[in-house]
Each structure stands twice: as C-alpha cells, then as structure tokens.
Image (cartoon, rainbow, N blue to C red):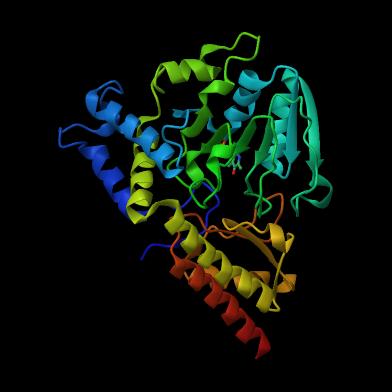
C-alpha cells in the first residue's frame, strides 16, 4: 500500500493523476510519442496548456472577469522578484507572516520603498498580525495566504484600495475565497497542484504597464501574456500534471467539495492535538492552517518512540521544517481522510503506551 504522505512539498498528488501522467510519458494522446518528446507548439500540447490555464480560472471563478492565467518557471521564489519588477514603482506594502513573506520582502526591497505593515517575526511567526493599516499610496499590498513553515493561515484578507497580491503557493484550490478581491495570485505547483517546475500566476491584466523601468523579457508578465504562456519552452510535464490535477479537482466538485474534506481532515487532527496530553500546537488557535498543522510533543523524551511508531504505520514526511522543529502534518488536497486517521491512531497508541 502507498504511504500516508504528509510531505510539505513537493507533496502528495492524486494516485489517478500519477497513473495518467506516467502513461503520457510513454505514449501521449495515442500518438506513439511521449509527452516530453514532442514540440510544445504541437497541437496536442497547446491544447494542454490552454486547458490548464482555463481550468485554473474556472475553478477560482475568475473566467471572463479580466484575469489571465500563466504557467511560468522559476518557482514562487522568482515571483517574489517578478511581482516587484512589474508592479513596484515607488512604494510597496508587505505583511510579514512567515519565512516566505520575509523572502518576498527581501527581493522587493531592491525596487523601491518597502512598508512592512506588520510582522509576527518577533514571535517565531506563531500568529497572524491583525489591525494593521495599508498606506493608500502603495503600488500594491502583498501577503502570503498560508504560511507553510509555521502552520498559520490568513482567514481574512484586508479591505484595501491598492492592488492585492497574494502568494497562495500552499493553499491555492483548497478553500473558497472571494478570489475577485485579488489582482495577482501566484503559486508554485508543487504544494497543491503538480510537480515542481511550474508556477501558476493569475493576473488581472489592467494592473500591468504602470512601471517605468525596463523589464527583461523573461521577467515581463505582459510578454508572457502576449505569448499565451509560451514565450519560451514551458515545463511541459509539470504543466500537464497540473492540468490533470485541476481536472481531477473539477470532477470531484471543485473547491467547495475539497474545502469540506480539508476542513474535516484539519478538525480531526487538531482535535487530537488539543485532546491528547502528549501533544500541543505551537501557533495561535484562531490562525491555524487547514493545510499544514504544526505540533510538538509535550515530553521530548518520547520522540524516538513516537518517530518509530509513525514510521512503522506507513506515515511519511511528518518532520517539522528545520527552522521550527517538532512535527508538521501537511494535509494538501490529495491527502485522504484515512491518512489523517492513521496519524491520529498512532498519537492515541502513544498515549495508551505511556499510560500503561
Ligand atoms: C514553497 C513555498 C514557496 C517557494 O516555492 P518555490 O517554488 O520553491 O520557489 C513560496 N511561498 C510559499 C508560501 C511556499 O509554501
């Protein structure tokens, strides 16, 4: 049986998607050629790219609303730079809620004035700051919807008149949001969509064209839009697998369906973390992430025993990020409820063992 995969990223993908993807590596489209040995400008691949782009907009409810989707390379990390390169004229406002926000801020600083509206860095990013204000003359406001490393998540997004930019790498397509509030959304594929190697960027076209600097072609959103996400050779395999995952999600019932499953999984695990005296959470309860649950043992001396027990139960990828320690259970869209149940069972077994 396949392992219960709690990896934070790259991470679990639907089994049926992996099967179709592996078939396409050998024989794509019944053309007796591999997906990765045909031209990206061939009809079958152009159709894949177009389908992936339209499924992304459709699932987010953004079709026909002035948005376009791109599948770029360079990961979410390159978007830290591209966002600023394309949108920052004089001043940008950023909310610092985690390791990834911090990196985005570092990249953007080179392009203009940086206003960090609030930060939870002083407390190890264990909560989401609230009640901050965003300068009305900022070129845009940037936030991270889900903090993959710390395990916190923005439940609400600020009302603001400035363009709203969001790094949704680790919770895109996991919950319903009013996506029309956002002017630019980006997400590396490898957390909830596909293999590493492509990044989904959703842009409201009217926010572009407002900076004066020269933008190198590969970093220029407008050029990628004009070329229908084919300015250069895209990551054909990563885009194909992303397309399959988006189709899988659509067939299941889209974001409303998966959100319900995700809430069930998170509830099951957090209930156990709160109930079981051997475990405790490490972030503010109201800010807990539905995707990445972080927790620690209340008695560190049980680490070896617990680590052995979960590994023997077929659980994988549970170690916390090296900067945080403890445990992190990443419960992305493709992780089934029974995998979370398997983890909860092991947590209860540990409790039984200790109380004997
Ligand atoms: C993983 C992650 C990134 C970095 O993604 P890369 O594709 O490795 O550059 C950025 N932001 C968030 C929220 C992430 O989870």
Q: Nearer the viewer, residue 303 or 294?
A: 294
* 78 relative to 296 in the view: left or right: left
Q: Quadrant of residue 163?
A: top right
Instruction: Say if 340 sits above or below 119 in the image.
Output: below
In the rendering, at what x and y percent does residue 136 appear?
Answer: 76, 29
Quadrant that contains the C terminus: bottom right
Query: Does the image show residue 307?
Result: no
Question: Measuring 37% from the left and 55% from the top, which residue is drawn there?
Answer: 253
Instruction: Say if 65 sits above or below 313 in the image.
Output: above
Q: Quadrant of residue 29?
A: top left
* 27 relative to 273 in the view: left or right: left
User: Quadrant for ligand 1?
Assistant: top right
In the rendering, at what x and y percent does residue 130 appear?
Answer: 78, 49
In the rendering, at what x and y percent does residue 115 appear?
Answer: 80, 30
Question: Measuring 78% from the left and 27% from the top, which residue is drawn there?
Answer: 114
In the rendering, at what x and y percent does residue 278 appear?
Answer: 69, 76
């Amino acid at each position: 049986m396949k392992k219960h995969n709690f990896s934070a990223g790259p991470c679990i993908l639907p089994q049926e998607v992996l099967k179709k993807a592996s078939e396409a590596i050998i024989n794509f489209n019944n053309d007796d050629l591999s997906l990765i040995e045909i031209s990206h400008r061939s009809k079958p691949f152009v159709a894949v790219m177009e389908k992936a782009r339209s499924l992304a907009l459709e699932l987010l409810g953004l079709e026909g609303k002035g948005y376009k989707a791109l599948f770029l390379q360079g990961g979410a990390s390159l978007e830290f730079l591209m966002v600023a390169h394309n949108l920052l004229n004089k001043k940008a406002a950023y909310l610092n809620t985690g390791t990834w926000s911090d990196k985005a801020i570092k990249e953007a600083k080179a392009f203009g004035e940086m206003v960090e509206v609030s930060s939870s860095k002083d407390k190890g990013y264990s909560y989401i700051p609230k009640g901050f204000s965003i300068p009305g003359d900022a070129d845009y406001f940037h936030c991270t919807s889900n903090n993959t490393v710390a395990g916190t998540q923005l439940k609400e997004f600020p009302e603001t008149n400035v363009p709203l930019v969001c790094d949704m790498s680790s919770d895109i397509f996991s919950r319903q949001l009013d996506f029309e509030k956002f002017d630019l959304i980006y997400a590396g594929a490898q957390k909830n969509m596909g293999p590493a190697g492509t990044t989904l960027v959703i842009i409201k076209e009217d926010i572009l064209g407002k900076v004066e600097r020269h933008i190198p072609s590969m970093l220029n959103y407008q050029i990628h839009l004009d070329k229908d996400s084919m300015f250069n050779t895209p990551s054909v395999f990563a885009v194909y697998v992303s397309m399959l995952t988006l189709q899988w999600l659509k067939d299941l019932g889209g974001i409303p369906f998966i959100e319900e499953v995700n809430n069930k999984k998170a509830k099951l695990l957090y209930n156990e973390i709160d109930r079981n005296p051997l475990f405790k959470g490490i972030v503010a309860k109201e800010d807990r992430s539905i995707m990445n649950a972080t927790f620690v043992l209340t008695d560190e001396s049980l680490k070896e025993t617990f680590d052995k027990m979960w590994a023997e139960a077929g659980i994988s990828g549970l170690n916390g990020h090296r900067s945080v320690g403890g445990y992190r259970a990443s419960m992305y869209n493709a992780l089934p409820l029974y995998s979370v149940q398997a983890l909860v069972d092991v947590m209860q077994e540990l409790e039984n063992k200790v109380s004997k």
